[in-house]
Image (cartoon, rainbow, N blue to C red):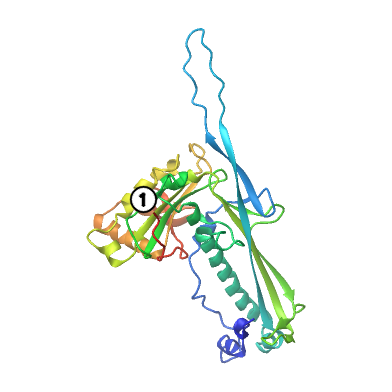
Amino acid sequence: MATGAWPTLADLTTRINGAQKQVYISEQLSQSNDVWDDLPMIEANEIGGHEFVFRTSIPAGAWRQYNMGVPYAKSTTAKARVSLGSLEDYSQIDRMLAEDSGDIDQFRENEDVAFLEGMSQTMVQTLFYGNTTITPAEFMGFSPFYNTLNTSNAQNAQNVISAGGSGNSNASLWLLCWGERTIFGLYPRGSKAGLTMEDKGDTVPGFDALGNRFEAYTSWFRHQMGLCPQDWRYGVRLANIDVTTAGLAGPNAYDLFAGMAQMMLFPPTLGKGTSGITKTDAVNDPSPGIRPVFYCNRTVRHWMDVQAMRDRNVLLRIDDYAGMPVDSYRGIPIKVVDQLLNTEATVS
């Protein structure tokens, strides 16, 4: 393990003031992870994965005449399986260093917060970009599921739209319709959802770069999760958004709102909330339990505002969402996810 793996005396001196008191650490590396407010978590039917059944065809019925029968018919289904991943880490602090800080609990908490933030960012990044083909230990994210425009390669390619960008300076805008029967997160069977943190105290020794032991305070973190796009029709990707100046500010810049309007046509139903009249979980909603949300990074979100002001788009507004004011387009919340990249390769 590298010698920079633990807080040092230099770290300690930056975390106390002249009165030798712990100071609040500004989390300047924190990022927006609003997706956690929307993602429904369902217990998987396996410890390390989740098997689900989806319908591949439905009966069409038959026209009948007098004295003529109706042929037998049935729907057809298929099985699929998604895996779960276990993200873990340890926070270790030299016991003597923690004691010299003057406030052991505060010093440890300041360090643990960084681990919690880092793991949260990693998990959201995996939610969108995780690929078990490249990293078998993680789970499959959205991008590998929606990674082609060619319907001959994948049926869900019909839910992937290209904004015309090329090269490796692209971003994506996502419309995800969360629900227990559409798209949801997973946690292992028999466990609990979310991040687990366990204080190991000073019973787990630390090791320096030479393998020598020292007493250390240890915190252990684990977050087990997976993703299940059980009904792929409720996920839509607007890919190949050119984030260069020419792509977003030039005379031929892609119309983001035209793309969003097109995206809304792909899910079978979105509910009355999309008109801005009622929430999507209203009693009289034809699609109860479905929660559609747009996700983009800050670059795309900025140019969305620029285009709205330029074109006086009245469909972009602030609505109440779960008691909080949130920007929305036609009643669907728009949220920023900092883990969405500006360096995506072209989807073709």
Residue 274 falls in image quadrant: top left
- Residue 34 image position (x, y, % from top left): 50, 60
From this view, report whether residue 288 is shown above or below residue 222: above
Residue 266 falls in image quadrant: top left
From this view, report whether residue 122 is shown above or below residue 62: below
From this view, report whether residue 302 is shown above or below residue 286: below
The quarter in which the C terminus is drawn is bottom left
Q: Amino acid at mark 1?
A: Met
**Mark 1, residue position:** 260
Q: Camera-side residue: 286 or 160?
A: 160
- Residue 59 image position (x, y, % from top left): 52, 27
Residue at (54%, 46%) from the top-left corner?
179
Q: Residue furthest right?
A: 203
Q: Residue furthest left?
A: 251
Q: Residue furthest top?
A: 67
Q: Residues within 10 Å of mark 1 (few under 14, many from 20)?
A: some
From this view, report whether residue 316 is shown above or below residue 170: above
Is residue 84 visible in this depiction of the protein?
yes
- Residue 136 image position (x, y, % from top left): 60, 61
